[in-house]
Image: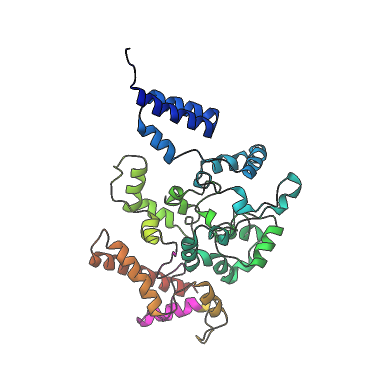
Amino acid sequence: MRNSKPSHLWRRTSVKRVWLYGLYGVSGLFLGVALVTANTDTGWAQAQKNPPPPKPVADVVCVNCHKTVTPGIVEDYMLSKHRQVMVGCATCHGNEHNSPSNVAKAKIPTPDTCAQCHPQRVDEFKKGKHALSWASMKAMPTMHFQPMALTQGMKGCGGCHKIGLKSEAEIKQLKEEGQSYGLASCDACHTRHSFSVKEARQPQACQTCHMGFDHPQWEMYSASKHGVRYLLKQNNTLPASTAAPTCQTCHMPKGDHAVGTAWGFLAVRLPLPEDEQWAKDQTTILQGLGVLDPDGQPTERLEVVKAASVARLTQEEWQARRNQMIDVCAQCHSRKFAVGELKKGDDMIRQADRLMAEGI
């Protein structure tokens, strides 16, 4: 008989078909028929390796309701890794909210929620500057004199600084004010509800906050050769193998979430520089910030600066961060070149401090 199959092969594929039908129902039948038609073990092995995960019963209820109420959230979740590995809605939001009448019972995740599955990354995050951004915002004297519109919501300082850790009292207050974004911190970069690692590795993930007239890191990066080459990789002008670092390459080596720099955002530090004029200028700036009094003595605000890690306060701490950056640069450049370029940055800070001190 033409195109007939050996009996042992037919029996083997038939057993697969029956087994699949019993396991997956109608959808399994179509998969089983496809395997029989292909008559290969490759497809069967792949199906065993990556079977479609069953949907938790509670999630069926959540999804059916939220398809109507918040369809975008459902679309993101269905595309997420969480969905693939069966991390359900209740894992992050609890199971007390189960109807439109008790929405307030839905738990808003915090970094500790994420730590249930990602303890190492959350531990790293808590050691970095992002975790301190909420405290550092409050440490700025001028912040407390700003209109509420500039300190709360998505358009003010709080829109970015909410990535920082908050006390239970602060979280409670924010919830009472109707603010839910930013309590989890992690979703500032891994936006909800897809929580994509790939997204968070793109430089655009940093652009949301690190841009603008008062902190134009994105503008500097995107105009640099580092940024230009990476953006050309993204639009396929340059090959994928082209060397082009992102923000994360240098500031999160090997995925380390303990982000931090030697100089910090304000570019001030202790001990003061050995250069006499530079030391005077930095003293003037620290007095302007309220960290030192008119006599150059520390004020109570220094303790706030310490708690928020706004500046490096020992030479050892500063040098450790500087060495970390040199090690990263040395992956592509010579160490001599890296040290020289960072020295140029130091000189720019020194000159800028001279102008700032004159203005104060």
Quarter of the image for residue 262 reads: bottom left
Q: How is the image coloured?
A: rainbow
The residue furthest right is 101
Quarter of the image for residue 176 reads: bottom right
The location of residue 258, given as percent across then percent down, is 44, 65
Report the residue at 37% width, 83% height from top.
276
Classify residue 312 as left or right of residue 136.
left
Residue 69 in sight: no
Report the residue at 43% width, 36% height from top.
47
Residue 260 drawn in magenta: yes
Instruction: Please state, as top left, top right, bottom left or bottom right, where the N terminus lies in the image.
Output: top left
Residue 46 drawn in magenta: no
Classify residue 313 as left or right of residue 166.
left
In the depicted structure, whether residue 20 falls above or below residue 192: above
Residue 329 in sight: yes
Report the residue at 47% width, 57% height from top.
210
The location of residue 354, given as percent across then percent down, is 41, 73
The residue furthest top is 1
In the depicted structure, whether residue 97 falls above or below residue 309: above
Name the main secondary structure of what is drawn in magenta. Answer: loop
Number of numbered discs present?
0
Report the residue at 50% width, 53% height from top.
189
Q: Nearer the viewer, residue 71 or 202?
A: 71
The location of residue 317, given as percent across then percent down, is 40, 76
The location of residue 241, given as percent across then percent down, is 28, 46
Q: Nearer the viewer, residue 237 or 143?
A: 237
Q: Which residues are magenta?
A: 258-286
